[in-house]
Image (cartoon, rainbow, N blue to C red):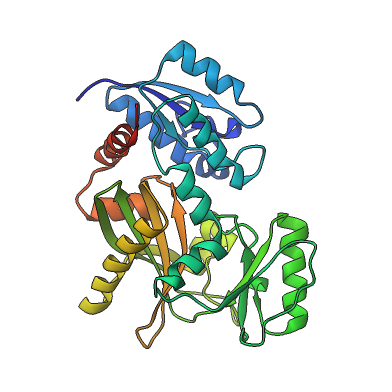
């Protein structure tokens, strides 16, 4: 294996320490992905340099000129505090002619827009929940064919930002209130989609032209509060204590009929191509009790901490963590035009 110069791009507040042992639990949780990626790349023998960026592109150019990396390992999830700006950093790397890991800018732009990705999927006869987009600074008018209950989300944010139990609405008054919350607090356009009661399934995929689909993963809820619905809220996704309290965990999906598993694999491959994804991504679905499968959203460059869904699914497929990161590097180099 060739020793590479790898520049890791991440948020300045997530530059990992040499060890997580002395960090408070919540801080260790926040930097777990960055810590494990950097440590594992070094264990693989690569020359790794870490750069935190948020407000300026110049440090990227200066570090590229000084360090001359073979590849950038992209862990950025936002720029200028906006998630939809992270694809601009990828475009900048392309302009600098520096290979990078993960998804290309076009795929990131398409996939991050939940309304656009659903329109593309529906056009190609992949079932999606009925939905409507609600841009900022416009009146909220629900289409007649959009029936309650609905779940209201940010149209572009990931990681369950802005999602709570209050996101599931059952009246026009609640819809207007929750859309206003997304507009004012999250500061993005909103999307309201039909709430699908069913199993929450995640399917990882890795590759460029040739795509490997990983085992299906499931988010499970054992001890929901009375009246709560089983949705991936921000607390469900990012609060370990709440997860433990409510018996929330993820594991390989069990008792999936062969036909459903085949459809998940086939649909994931189709969506990966239709949305112009490269590198690695996770596709989220809801499986209704009657066997109907609904595409919810695509997540380019999903979280890859060892214990999270993507790396866990890779491990179930026989791909060790160090091999997963090496594969991500190799795919980034192969995708390069230079």
Q: Quadrant of residue 113?
A: bottom right
The C terminus sits in image quarter: top left
184 in relation to 82, above or below: below
147 in relation to 111, above or below: below
Residue 147: give x, y in percent of width and height: 61, 86
Please state which of residues 146 and 4 is positioned toward the viewer in this rendering: 146
Q: Is residue 108 left or right of residue 164?
A: left
Q: Is residue 163 left or right of residue 237?
A: right
Please state which of residues 108 and 195 is positioned toward the viewer in this rendering: 108
Residue 221 visible to the viewer: no
Residue 229: give x, y in percent of width and height: 56, 77
Residue 95: give x, y in percent of width and height: 49, 28
Q: Is residue 205 left or right of residue 225?
A: left
Residue 314 visible to the viewer: yes
Residue 288: give x, y in percent of width and height: 41, 82
User: Residue sitting at 74 percent across and 83 percent down?
Assistant: 172
Please state which of residues 171 and 295 is positioned toward the viewer in this rendering: 295
Marks counted in the figure total: 0
Taking the view exactly as shown, the residue that stands out farthest to the top is: 66
Please state which of residues 126 and 27 is positioned toward the viewer in this rendering: 126
The N terminus sits in image quarter: top left
Q: Quadrant of residue 205?
A: bottom left
Q: Is residue 110 left or right of residue 140?
A: left
21 in relation to 310, above or below: above
User: Residue sitting at 45 percent across and 73 percent down?
Assistant: 122
User: Residue sitting at 54 percent across and 62 percent down?
Assistant: 116
């Amino acid at each position: 294996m060739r020793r590479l110069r790898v520049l890791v791009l991440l948020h300045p507040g997530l530059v990992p320490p040499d060890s997580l042992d002395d960090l408070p639990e919540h801080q260790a949780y926040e930097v777990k992905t960055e810590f494990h990626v950097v440590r594992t790349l070094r264990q693989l023998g690569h020359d790794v340099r870490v750069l935190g960026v948020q407000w300026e592109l110049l440090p990227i150019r200066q570090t590229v000129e000084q360090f001359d990396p073979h590849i950038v390992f992209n862990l950025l999830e936002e720029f200028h505090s906006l998630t939809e700006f992270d694809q601009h950093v990828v475009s900048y790397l392309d302009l600098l002619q520096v290979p990078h890991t993960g998804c290309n800018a076009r795929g990131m732009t398409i996939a991050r827009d939940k309304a656009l990705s659903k329109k593309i999927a529906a056009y190609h006869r992949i079932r999606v929940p009925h939905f409507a987009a609600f841009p900022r600074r416009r009146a909220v008018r629900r289409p007649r064919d959009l029936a309650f209950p609905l779940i209201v989300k940010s149209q572009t944010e990931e990681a369950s930002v802005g999602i709570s139990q209050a996101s599931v609405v059952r009246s026009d008054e609640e819809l207007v209130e929750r859309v206003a919350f997304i507009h004012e607090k999250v500061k993005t356009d909103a999307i309201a989609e039909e709430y699908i009661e069913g199993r929450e399934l995640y399917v990882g995929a890795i590759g460029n032209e040739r795509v490997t689909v990983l085992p299906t993963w499931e988010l499970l809820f054992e001890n929901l509060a009375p009246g709560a619905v089983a949705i991936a809220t921000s607390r469900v996704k990012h609060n370990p204590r709440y997860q433990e309290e409510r018996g929330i965990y993820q594991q390989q999906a069990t008792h999936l009929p062969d036909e459903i598993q085949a459809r998940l694999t086939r649909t994931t491959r189709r969506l990966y191509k239709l949305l112009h994804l490269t590198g690695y991504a996770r596709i989220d679905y809801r499986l209704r009790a009657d066997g109907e499968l609904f595409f919810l959203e695509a997540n380019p460059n999903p979280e890859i901490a060892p214990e999270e869904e993507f790396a866990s699914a890779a491990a179930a497929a026989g791909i060790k963590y160090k091999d997963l990161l090496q594969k991500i590097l190799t795919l980034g180099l192969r995708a390069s035009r230079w």
